[in-house]
Image (cartoon, helix red, strand yellow):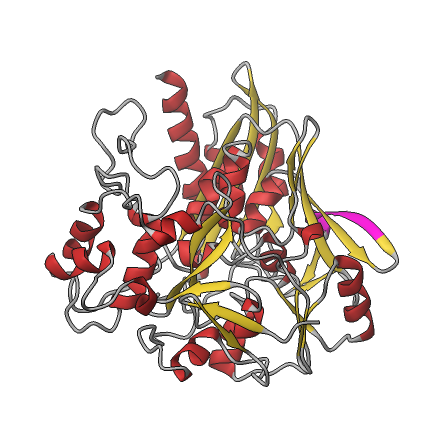
């Protein structure tokens, strides 16, 4: 087995002796690459953003922006990283750096390297360019969140600036042309990513395959399993939690499949949320509505369905959507596999039927998809925030009558739940006549008064979510 190492700005660097809890950010700064900063230590500000070579969909490699403050540097063993220092130099600025400078996109400079890396990931996005999309179906006005150069401002949704203001940063993004023909980072995307390799240190391991991973976690029930580390990284940084063993499963090929069949859509537990959106390509319309509201691009570039469901959090945004789709989970252990409906998976606050030694291998979504879908997230910020309430709808309407309904709720009980009483109140009634069902939905769950919202507010938002969904879809049907 090779000694662990990572390629940073084109140079290989050893990782021998690095503690398992050391983040990529701390390790990089320890090597003098201090452009990336710690602003929040929980993946909300983007000051720590770096580029990592990840598998692409239309190109072999895609430069992907990640929060270096959350990722254990040992999880980057064998991979390639580019920091703000690796993009350009004062004498030869990268196009992103040049536009940020000449358009006044930097003031104190603290957040600038993170913005530059996230902007560079979008700069190199395969397929960027062409006409900007529209915000409203049937409109001829281009989206205010996409530039004439195809730049998607959502690429910067995980980066916060506290002094410059976002207009000059937006101006810099919208001024970028296509990469030059001789751009080495653009050319690098035409080559495959480094092959995944096994890693073994006293407190961090990346097994070679799923069988080895299952054997390891079966032998070590004290091990913490991580994929994108978007949850575990917060525990390490803010709560000082340390694990006797961290097991990385993010690159196991058995957990990274995605297939769309006539009867079922199966998504591997270690496929990132960003990859899911690209690889599904509209095959699951409800996820097209949900995923853009999940945290930020930086987080979605690392987060996985397996991680989001594995934590058992009652406010994880994917669970309500998957409940509305009637999804099930494939759980695997050294003894074999079993399939569990997601509605039966959660047993209590951050508890589930998953036993010691089991992993989530995949999520299965039955076909066909519901005819009417919707996702409402109530949060203090439009993006990059934790939901107070999340509501997902999956309905079938036949001849104006609700023939089937599944509604998933998050943030209103100790676990994500199905709104069974509301579903019953809808089925068999004319679509659009939802006032009574909305009152039922307002009483679903056992919402709490906490710092995010009061119980009364949550109940009101549940009711309003159904009324809004019905109104919007009735109007759409009339167009």
Residue placed most toward the observer, 66 or 61 = 61
Q: Nearer the viewer, residue 13 or 203?
A: 13
Q: Is residue 265 above or below residue 164?
A: above
Q: Quadrant of the C terminus?
A: top left
Query: What residue lies at 50% left-to-right and 24% top-to-bottom?
Result: 431
Q: Which of the pair 305/248 is nearer the observer?
A: 248
- Above or below, 270 against 391 in this view is below
Viewer can see residue 340:
yes
| Residue 458 as seen in the image, left or right of residue 164 | right
Query: Percent position (x, y) of residue 79?
Result: 53, 63
Up/down of 406 relative to 97, above or below? above
- Asked if the stretch drawn in magenta spans residue 92, the answer is no
State which quadrant residue 258 falls in: top right
* Magenta extent: 337-344
The percent position of residue 226, horizontal first and vertical second, equals: 62, 66
Left or right of residue 328: residue 114: left
At a point 47% along the width and 44% down the height, the residue shown is 290
Seen at 44% across and 64% down, the residue is: 81
Extreme-top residue of the structure: 399
User: Would you say 120 lies left or right of 106 here?
Assistant: right
Quadrant housing residue 132: top left
Question: Residue 381, can we see it?
Answer: no
Which residue reaches farthest front? 182
Q: Position of residue 299 (x, y in %)?
A: 45, 59
Near-viewer residue (27 or 408): 27
Q: Main secondary structure of the magenta part?
A: strand
Q: Which image quarter: residue 1?
A: bottom right
Residue at position x 26%, y 69% from top? Answer: 111
Position in image of residue 388 (x %, y %): 44, 58
Q: How many numbered badges does the structure rendering display?
A: 0
């Amino acid at each position: 087995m090779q000694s662990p190492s990572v390629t940073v700005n084109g140079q290989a660097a050893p990782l021998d002796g690095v503690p398992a809890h050391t983040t990529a950010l701390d390790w990089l700064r320890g090597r003098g690459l201090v452009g990336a900063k710690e602003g929040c230590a929980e993946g909300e500000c983007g000051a720590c953003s770096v580029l990592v070579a990840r598998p692409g969909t239309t190109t072999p490699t895609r430069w992907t922006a990640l929060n270096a403050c959350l990722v254990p540097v040992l999880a980057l063993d064998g991979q390639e990283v580019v920091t703000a220092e690796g993009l350009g130099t004062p004498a030869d600025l990268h196009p992103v750096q040049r536009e940020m400078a000449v358009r006044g996109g930097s003031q104190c400079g603290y957040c600038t390297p993170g913005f530059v890396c996230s902007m560079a990931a979008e700069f190199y996005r395969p397929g960027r360019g062409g006409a900007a999309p529209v915000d409203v179906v049937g409109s001829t006005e281009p989206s205010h969140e996409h530039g004439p150069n195809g730049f998607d401002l959502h690429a910067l949704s995980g980066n916060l600036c506290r002094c410059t203001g976002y207009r000059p940063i937006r101006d810099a993004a919208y001024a970028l042309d296509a990469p030059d023909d001789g751009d080495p980072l653009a050319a690098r995307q035409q080559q495959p990513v480094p092959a995944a390799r096994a890693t073994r240190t006293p407190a961090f391991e990346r097994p070679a395959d799923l069988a080895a991973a299952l054997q390891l976690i079966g032998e070590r029930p004290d091990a913490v399993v991580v994929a994108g580390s978007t949850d575990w990284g917060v525990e390490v940084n803010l709560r000082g939690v340390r694990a006797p063993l961290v097991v990385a499963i993010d690159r196991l090929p058995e957990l990274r499949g995605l297939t769309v069949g006539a009867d079922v859509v199966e998504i591997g537990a270690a496929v990132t949320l960003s990859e899911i959106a690209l690889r599904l390509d509209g095959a699951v319309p409800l996820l097209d509505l949900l995923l853009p509201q999940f945290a930020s691009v930086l987080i979605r570039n690392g987060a996985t369905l397996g991680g989001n469901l594995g934590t058992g959090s009652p406010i994880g945004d994917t669970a309500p959507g998957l409940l509305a789709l009637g999804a099930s989970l494939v759980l695997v252990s050294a003894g074999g596999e079993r399939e569990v409906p997601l509605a039966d998976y959660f047993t209590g606050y951050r508890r589930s039927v998953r036993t010691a030694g089991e992993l989530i291998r995949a999520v299965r979504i039955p076909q066909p998809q519901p005819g009417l879908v919707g996702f409402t997230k109530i949060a203090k910020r439009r993006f990059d925030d934790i939901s107070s309430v999340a509501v997902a709808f999956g309905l079938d309407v036949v001849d104006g009558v609700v023939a089937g309904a599944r509604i998933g709720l998050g943030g209103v009980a100790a676990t994500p739940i199905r709104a069974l009483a509301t579903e019953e109140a809808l089925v068999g009634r004319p679509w659009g006549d939802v006032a009574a069902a909305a009152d039922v939905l307002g009483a679903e769950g056992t919402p709490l008064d906490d710092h995010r919202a009061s119980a009364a507010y949550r109940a009101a938002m549940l009711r309003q979510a159904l009324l809004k969904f019905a109104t919007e879809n009735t109007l759409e049907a009339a167009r």
